[in-house]
Image (cartoon, coloured by chain):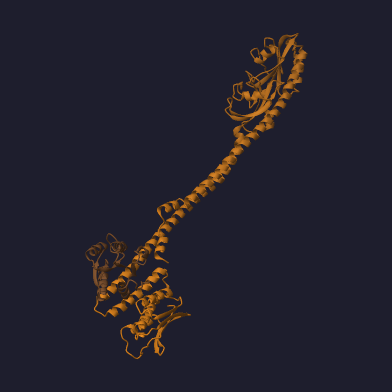
Amino acid sequence: MKVLVVEDEPLIRLGIVSLIEDAGWLTADASDADAAVELLEGEPGIGVMITDVDMPGSMDGIGLAWVVQRRWPAIRIIAISGKVSIDRSALPSGARYFSKPLVDEHLLAAIASPSAPSDTR
Amino acid sequence: MNAEAAVGAASPMSPERRRARRWEAPHIIVAGAVALVAVIVGIFVLLCFQGYASTINNARERVETAAGVVAEETKWVFAATRSTLGQLAGRLGGDPAAATPQAMRDLESAMSSLPMQARVGIYNAAGDLVAAGPATAPAMESVADADFFDAVAGGEPWALSAQLRHPETGEATFAVARRLDSGGTFRGAALAIVDADVLRSLADSQDLGEGSTISVIRTDGWIIARTPPLSAPANVSNMENFALLMASESGSYESGVSPVDGVARIVGFHHVPELGYIAIASIARDTVLAGLWNSIWIVSWLIAPIAVALLVGSLITARVMRRTQATSRSLAEALAHNEVLFREIHHRVKNNLQAINSLLQLHPIPREVRADMSQRIAAMSAVHEHIYRSHTFARVQVKDYLHKLIDNIRAVNDPSVQVIVRIEDVAVDKDAATPLGLIVNEVVSNAFKHAFGDGRSGTIEITLVGEGDTARLTVHDNGTGFDPEAPAKGIGRRLIGGLTAQLHGESTHTSDADGSTFTLTFPLARD
């Protein structure tokens, strides 16, 4: 299984990719929603998408989450954000949410299992 | 408090609402003041009209009464004159030729009993003067052209002249004419020529004020006598109110500008039909209204400053209110701006903490160390987030914050370990919240990691109680315990020591057969 990391800040993207690869998964990464969709269209093996919410481009992470849920319903979605006031109900049902800064173990557990506990922050 | 809600509440009003608000208080105050002034002025004008009507009514009653008095007084004058002339006519036997000097002297003494200055002239049928008295006073030489002479020549026993002016003395007079006849043949006329000044004493006693007149007029409109006197004979029959004058026995009316002297008056009249004249008393409208105008003027001077003060006051109040509203608006906008700024900074702080976490991921250090670090960073961020959400900065209520922190630690650890949390809602200094959170993170994570290494299930008990000025945190596990003498691995113990010092507190970590117990005591208030 491959994990797609969509994050506009390169350092954060790099760190998350590094964490996931260290844990043993393959990764793909994109810096915005359009690049992510393009990547998803060419990469059939992606099982989990981690996306930042606040991103520049034609749509933000919430928009991307909805597109992915509609077009690739098998892909599990994990949204992450540094914003305090994210309306979690705006996310598609089944999508997970984690607040930045991430606790490594929380993220890895969520990638590993759809039933892992959510961030309570 | 939810940050979104806080921003929503502080955000500026919608343009419609603001426009509606802009039309509210200040303009209502000005409109209210204007309305109040309008009401005051309206009432004042109404009272002026009422005052005017009642003043005019009073004046009408007054001139009607005066006209009645003039009618009574003049009736007596005319009756006495007629009586005297009647006696003279009887004595002459209707013949002017019988007017001997002796007869005239007798007449003179009779005339002296009359209430006014009068003289007598005897005229023959051609209208020429044949005798006069008193001898010192000149009389008209001929009355052949006079209408009153025509009247008595035509058969009237009596006639009244219009106002006459003596061609020599210029005095205003009028005449009472008595037909002289014998056997039905007209012989001439006896005239009592009365000084028009006879009305002056009446006018004085009535005291109607400046511009007032007392007059008597014939029913054909010719003025017989008037005070003040006329410079020339005048006829009022062509005046618009003459019909009114003739329509009733007595009454009053408001006359326009008089053709005689250009003064507008309130006129009272009283007919004396048996003697064929009308008594008139009038007061100049200006005299009548002088008192009213004076009152209006005084009240206007009283009202005007009040009205001006009211209007100016309301304008000033409205201006102050508008300024206050503008200030409130800009404050609300500034607050909203600050909220946005605050949220943005918070966002940035969290992103930066994530960037630090990401930097750590890139270092070639053990994965467990990185995981611990990410948990510590998350614990620091949790305080930050709690402060942001609670909007209290000086002191931090730690109950919710520590509960969430402990939940997050449990989420990534062995779920079979029972965790009992008893945390009082203690408020700690803002600088104490982060060290306290990091200590809880360290101690509880350590307990999870090391206490139950042999796979046994156990219990971790976390207690925080406030004891006056201090708080006590206890973390007890019933695990395997540890050797206090053993050298510390990792940074955990050093970190706890440093954080305890930061809290100005004291901490102990003991181990016995029941497991290990960590105790931290720290002051709640900071100097």
The C terminus of chain B lies in quadrant: bottom left
| In the image, residue B226 above or below residue B524 | above
Residue B105 in view (yes/no) = no
Instruction: Name the side, left or right, on which B18 lies relative to B357.
Output: right
Q: Nearer the viewer, residue B287 or B57?
A: B57
Residue B304, percent from left and from top:
54, 45
Q: Taking A121 as reference, is B276 above or below it? A: above
Quarter of the N terminus of chain B within the rendering: bottom left
Give residue B19's position: percent from left, percent from top.
42, 51
Tell me the quarter of the picture where residue B168 sits. top right
Residue ID at (38%, 83%): B457
Query: Seen in the image, is B116 located left or right of residue B234?
Result: right
| Chain A visual colour | brown
Q: Which chain is orange?
A: B
Q: Residue at x 34, y 86 (%)?
A: B454
Q: Horizontal and vertical percent for residue B29? A: 50, 51
Tell whether B129 sits left or right of B240.
right
Given residues B308 and B260, the one toward you in this image is B308
